[in-house]
Image: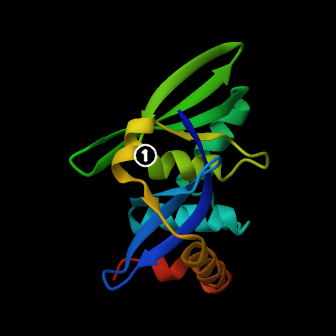
Amino acid sequence: MIEMSLVGVRVEVPTNQPIVLLREEAGSRYLPIFIGPPEATAIVYALQGMETPRPMTHDLFKSVLDELGAALRQVVITELHDGTFYAEIEILRDGTTQRISSRPSDALALAARYPETVPIYADEAVLDEAGVLFDQDEEESQIEEFREFLNQVRPEDFAAE
């Protein structure tokens, strides 16, 4: 397993398809995963610390886990089949660990809601197949462009038309 960090969400041009971007912690590969607009909104809300008048689905799920005395231990991107990514969330409750199948976008939206960093991992085979490399100059430029995007993006930008 390769440790990853959640860089954020961006919109692929010209399709306007949201992408969640993960970065390899001890390397230079990135893992872009296409996600739906609702999940993109959920992740952006969490990353920007935005609160909604009523709980979103991922907020509700975190509240349920908290009430049950359970905690999200980690997120693992486990597989890639025919362009579809698969993930699992690992929940710890009463000393027992349980793995539950999840879409990566939902797992990451949940993880982003915790004040402490929830570890994110990707299977080596997934990163080998779908990981991308940026050269150093391009990487710095892309990261700066991405920071500008995060500073300007609004959750409404992901709303379906």
Residue nearest the observer in this picture, 124 or 34: 124
Disc 1 secondary structure class: helix
Location of residue 107 in the rendering, given as x and y in whole percent from the top left corner = 52, 45
How far across and down, in percent of the image, does residue 19 sit?
44, 66
Query: In the rendered image, is residue 60 in sight?
Result: yes
Name the one closer to the observer, 120 or 62: 120
Q: How is the image coloured?
A: rainbow
Above or below for 80 versus 140: above
- Residue at the farthest right position: 116
Residue 18: name its quadrant.
Answer: bottom left
Query: Measured along the vertical axis of the image, is residue 49 above or below residue 119?
Result: below
Q: Which residue matches tag 1?
A: 127
Residue 25 position, x and y percent, is 64, 49
Q: Quadrant of the C terminus?
A: bottom left
Q: Residue at x 55, y 62 (%)?
A: 42
Is 48 on the left or on the right of 75, as rendered? right
- In this rendering, would 35 be left or right of 157? left
Picture quadrant where residue 91 is located = top right
Name the residue nearer the viewer: 64 or 45: 45
